[in-house]
Image: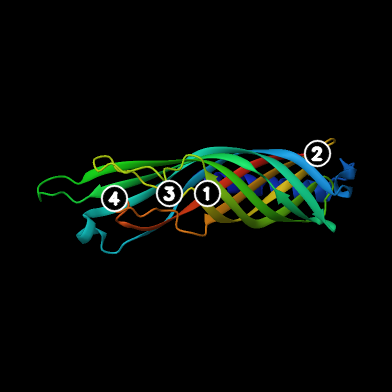
Amino acid sequence: MMKKLIFILIFTFLGIEFGLAQRIPQARNYRKFDRNLFHFGFMLGVNTSDFSTQYKPNMVNEFGTYSVTNRSQPGFQLGLISSMKIGTPLIRLRFIPSLSFQERILEYNFVPIQPNEDFEFQEERVGSTNLDFPLLLKFRTKRYNNFAAYIIAGAQYSLDLQSKETNSQKFGDPFIKLYRDDFQGQVGAGMDFFLPFFKFGIELKLSHGFNNALIQDNSRLSQPIESLRNRVWWFSLTFEG
């Protein structure tokens, strides 16, 4: 629901602003922005994170697991923006070291031991506090008055400060273990609004892990799962000067 709302808001703002830019002549704000080689700023945003999952086909018979449901949860992030012009103002290289807080939920239904018993339900919350280091190429349109649209693509390295990679499992209280380090591809789009003294941006991105993040330690929770890859939707507000 949140993703649909974000898409609707972005395209509504895009249509309104583009229409106004075409019809109403405006004084150009922050004219020197495109002349400078480097720009700096900060980013604030929210996210919804979950897993791209692959389960083992024999998990019912072999592991007694009827189903595993993946549910996304909200989080937030903040970061510092470094942006460098590459030849033309329409192409920029962006580095945005960030701190993000994420949570996902895996819901398990285990087959009952006795036929007349109910399914056993268990909810596993997987939280992460990440240091993210995305390196992105930004491709922007020409300015229409004080507005421009852009797309971005690149990759990021994430370091999970909350990782339980080295923690020992307890037989009676198992938990999902993820690798501390993760590499993700990232794509997105956004809009820039040139204000008198700074540039304001609205941005939507998708990150998807390249590697399986799950540590398979043969616990009751990890056995039915073949792979878990991190997947995050990011909605960000950017401020650059």
Disc on the earlier residue, 2 or 1: 1
Under mark 2, the amino acid is Gly
Q: Secondary structure at mark 2?
A: loop
The amino acid type of the residue labelled 1 equals Val
Q: Residues within 10 Å of mark 3 (few under 14, many from 20)?
A: many
Give the residue type at disc 4: Ser
For label 4, the residue is: 219
In space, the residues marked 2 and 1 are separated at their CA atoms by 27 Å
Q: Position of residue 226 (x, y in %)?
A: 36, 60
Q: CA distance from mark 4 to mark 1?
A: 26 Å
Tag on residue 178? 3
The quadrant of the image that shows the C terminus is top right
- Determine the secondary structure under disc 1: strand
Query: Which x, y percent locates residue 28?
Result: 88, 43
Side (left or right) of 129 relative to 175:
right
Where is mark 1, residue-wise?
Answer: 232
Q: Is residue 100 visible?
A: yes
* Distance between mark 2 and mark 4 Cα atoms: 50 Å
Work out whether residue 42 or residue 236 is closer to the camera in this orientation and state it: 42
Identify the residue at horizontal 74%, vertical 54% (top origin): 93
Q: Residues within 10 Å of mark 1 (few under 14, many from 20)?
A: many
Mark nearer the viewer, 1 or 3: 3
Considering only order in the chain, which callout, 3 or 1, is on the residue closer to the N terminus? 3
Residue 19 in view in this figure:
no
**Residue neighbourhood size for the residue with mark 2, other residues' Cα within 10 Å, grouped as few (<14), some (14–19), many (≥20):** some
Asked which secondary structure carries label 3, the reply is loop
